[in-house]
Amino acid sequence: MNQTITTGILEVTYVVASVMFILGLKMLSHPETARRGNTIAAFGMGFAIIATILFHKKDGQPIGNIPWILAAITIGTAIGWVIAKRVKMTAMPQLVSFFNGMGGAAAALISMMEFPHVSPELIAKSGMANGHVLAILLGLMIGTISWAGSMIAFGKLDGWIGDMRIKAMKYVNLTILAVLIGFIVYIMTRHVAASAELTPLIYVMFVIAVIYGVLFVMPIGGADMPVVISLLNSFTGVAAAMGGFLYSNQAMLTGGILVGSAGTILTILMCKAMNRSLLNVIVGVFGGGGQSNMEAGGVIKEISLSDAAVLLSYSKKVVIVPGYGLAVAQAQHTCHELDKLLEEKGVEVKYAIHPVAGRMPGHMNVLLAEADVPYDKLIESDEINPDLPNTDVLVVIGANDVVNPAAEDDPSSPIYGMPIIKARDAKNIIVMKRGMGKGYAAIENMLFFNDKTRMLFGDAKSTLQNLVNEIKNL
Amino acid sequence: MENILDFFLKNREAIFLVILSVFLGIEVISHVPAILHTPLMSGANAIHGVVIIGAIIVMGHAATTSSMILGFLAVVLGTLNVVGGFVVTDRMLEMFKKKK
């Protein structure tokens, strides 16, 4: 085949792939079409990859090293497939973070390899200050930050990295960011014959970007991890788009930017839901650690399983508020068993889903969907709040910050202003909790001391199971 | 100044594409119900795996051993992003389908 035909086929495939990405993303936003949307995007990706291997030419040179490329793809597919299939549903957020990091690392590697090969003609003409170099440097910086940050987020969600907070972190992070931008400016204003002369600087930049990525995510605890993952996700999108600039590759450009902008909007939506500014996220000091003026006062009142069973069985309306505790205990199936049992007894059961309950937006929806809870029973917090005063029993299962009244009462609380599920409006409140530990945001929850609140301590799954048995025996 | 304008002229299609894609991304996501946030994030995560194309190009023109190794790594990581991302998303969405 001659050059025109192969290039033509390649470009057409890229257009088709781009359309499939857009269509896929669009379909992903409706429950009925979501799964097909994902498949369409995946096929788009497949076409783009195959066409690239077969038809891509750089300065007339076709793609070489094909056996090695295929070997790499096979290895990546095998590992990715196995991890994705094996991992538990509760570990989903960290998995997304992990895969996101892989993309970021790939983008950074591409930049590192391309940097020494900027065409000498381009440098002779416009020096280092050209779009090509800028795309490489930004791809390196953003990709690396995304990779390092995602790995830390992964480690934190998986529980083997703790929070680390230093007061001056904000300034440290801003300084590092300024240094990184300084590096870009410095490199672009050098006068050299070949970019390869500056290669060592690239490695220094890489190291600094790793440090930034680590420090950026390290202090973030609280309910803020979802925001970070979403933000890093859009970072990787932008890093991929830089590759698109570099190779004038439409598929990379559309795919990357699409994810970059969609991810940013999602991040902003999440920030709004939690009453934080995006700037605070980027600077890297938010979540947890805030000192509250409110003293934890009052008495904790426990309830016995049998009393809880009676209370629930003779209610008209029950609302369940699930949280991360439910996910950790893998209690979603038992929870559904409880709600079916109650419905058989004529109790109306609904789930109140806070947008950031769990560790990711929509985390609870995914879990409950796994347990076959019909999704018209899952009500968003804004919608269910007006209904809560008519609710006989509100059952909090392993949720904490999303029902914390401090968000409304205590201006000094770090979560002040975050929209919450107004649990205390309900007539009775049962809180299932492992112990008196604080929530992920590490703040005291006055709800537990409320007169209407009764505590049911224990692992969510076994407590729920005992409760189900108790109700069956009534 | 001339540099910037020159860059703009040479890349005007790409720049148009970027601007339009930004709006498209915003448009697509702004009507998403909260229940689909996680799968959507995961799906978007898989789509930026498109960076693998860059990895393939780099690897395809790698000449030295070191660039072969780095390129190989880049392709493996990119594939992980793509395959892992799509498979995980599919697994999440599979559950939504079983609705009665």
Image (spheres, rainbow, N blue to C red):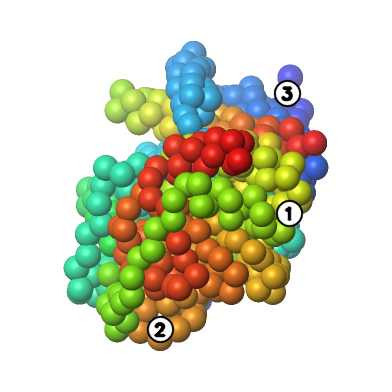
Amino acid type, label 3: Asn
Label 3 Cα neighbours within 10 Å, binned few <14 / some 14-19 / many ≥20: few
Q: Residue at x 64, y 50 (%)?
A: A313
A141 sits left or right of A85 in the view = left
Which residue is disc 3 drawn over?
A2
Amino acid type shown at disc 1: Glu
What's the residue at 22%, 59% (across, down)?
Answer: A164
Left or right? Give the position of A164 relative to A439: left
Q: Give the labeled residue for mark 1.
A: A348
SS type, badge 3: loop
Instruction: Kindly check if marks 1 and 2 are in contact, taking CB atoms under 8 A apart as contact.
Output: no
Where A252 falls versus A227 (above or below)? above
Q: Which residue is mark 2?
A: A410
Upstream in sequence: badge 3 or badge 1: 3
The residues tagged by marks 3 and 2 sit, at their Cα atoms, a distance apart of 71 Å
- Total residue callouts: 3
Q: Quadrant of the C terminus of chain A?
A: top right
Crowdedness near tag 2: few (<14), some (14–19) or many (≥20) residues, C-alpha within 10 Å: some
Q: Residue at x 56, y 66 (%)?
A: A428
Q: Earlier in the sequence, mark 1 or mark 2?
A: 1
Q: Residue A345: horizontal and vertical position, in percent?
A: 73, 45
Task: Tell me the amino acid under the disc marked 2.
Answer: Asp
- Which chain is mark 3 on? A
Give me the C-alpha separation between circle 1 and circle 2. 33 Å
Q: Residues within 10 Å of mark 1 (few under 14, many from 20)?
A: some
Q: Is residue A459 visible?
A: yes
Distance from disc 3 to disc 1, alpha carbons, whole Å, reads: 69 Å
Which quadrant does the N terminus of chain A fall into? top right
Which of the two discs, 3 and 1, sits closer to the camera? Answer: 1
Q: Nearer the viewer, residue A78 or A409?
A: A409
Chain at numbered mark 1: A
Q: Residue at x 70, y 63 (%)?
A: B30
